[in-house]
Image (tube, grey):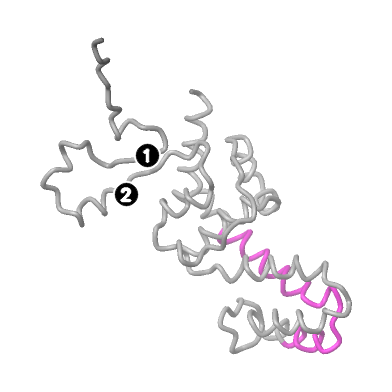
Amino acid sequence: MRGAAVSMPRLDKMPGMFFSATPKELKGTDHSLLDDKMQKRRPKTFGMDVKAYLRSMIPHLESGMKTSKSKEILSADEVMQWSQSLEKLLATRTGQDVFGSFLKSEYSEENIEFWLACEDYKSTESDLLRCKAEKIFKAFVHSDAAKQINIDFRTRESTAKKIKAPTLTCFDEAQKIVYTLMEKDSYPRFLKSNIYLNLLNDLQANSLK
């Protein structure tokens, strides 16, 4: 009985695997050059976890990115809606992750981290308000905070007084200032960034296949 010829698939054509060079090109190529090519290559995004996509887009962000509790498969329509307003962008966990990664690339991630902390704070039970308020204030509002947000002196002092008898609204004023800062400054740049445009272009291209 004649054995059937076995055809080995080309690794560079296998779905889900991305190579910056063909096997022939890999021979004799310096490893550091290969690493540079792998980092510069834009990955496909269809069916990928957004975290994996962002890590491949901006490798140095990996250590600072939190793990999402859910994996979302994005659609081009959803990503296009992000351009309608900052509110639309921040309405989903994936939008928060992508925008947060952009802010991290600009070294201003404290803004969305503070905004998200305030959103979480608003659902805090009354017996935990003081503890959580003090943590948020120390992390973002205090003049010596490691991730100090950019707010005026009056708002900083006013917030310091409010957390002495904390309520669910004691960070509202500071949160509004930070939101406006992101809306007027960071958000327009995000819509023109490679992070956003490449993600949108890849999803649109895949939707046509």
User: What amino acid is found at the position of numbered circle 2 in the picture?
Assistant: Lys
Helix, strand or loop at label 2? It is helix
The numbered mark at residue 40 is 2
Q: Are marks 1 and 2 in contact (CB under 8 Å)?
A: no
Q: Which of 185 and 139 is in front in this view?
A: 139
Helix, strand or loop at label 1? It is loop
Q: Distance between the residues labelled 1 and 2?
A: 15 Å
**Residue 197 left/right relative to 112:** left
Q: Which of 62 and 86 is in front in this view?
A: 62
The numbered mark at residue 17 is 1
Residue drawn at 61 percent across, 62 percent down: 182
Crowding near pointer 2: few (<14 within 10 Å), some, many (20+)?
some
- Report the mark closest to the observer, 1 or 2: 1
Q: What stretch is highlighted in magenta?
A: 157-186
The spot of residue 133 in percent (x, y) is: 76, 81
Quadrant of res 3: top left
**Residue 123 left/right relative to 31:** right
The spot of residue 202 in percent (x, y) is: 47, 36
Residue drawn at 67 percent across, 64 percent down: 180
Q: Is residue 184 magenta?
A: yes
Residue drawn at 26 percent across, 54 percent down: 35
Q: Residue furthest front?
A: 1
Crowding near pointer 1: few (<14 within 10 Å), some, many (20+)?
few
Placement of 100 over or under 4, stated as above or below: below
Placement of 81 over or under 167, stated as above or below: above
Quadrant of res 128: bottom right
The spot of residue 123 in percent (x, y) is: 83, 67
Residue drawn at 62 percent across, 65 percent down: 112
User: What amino acid is found at the position of numbered circle 1 in the picture?
Assistant: Met
Quadrant of res 155: bottom right
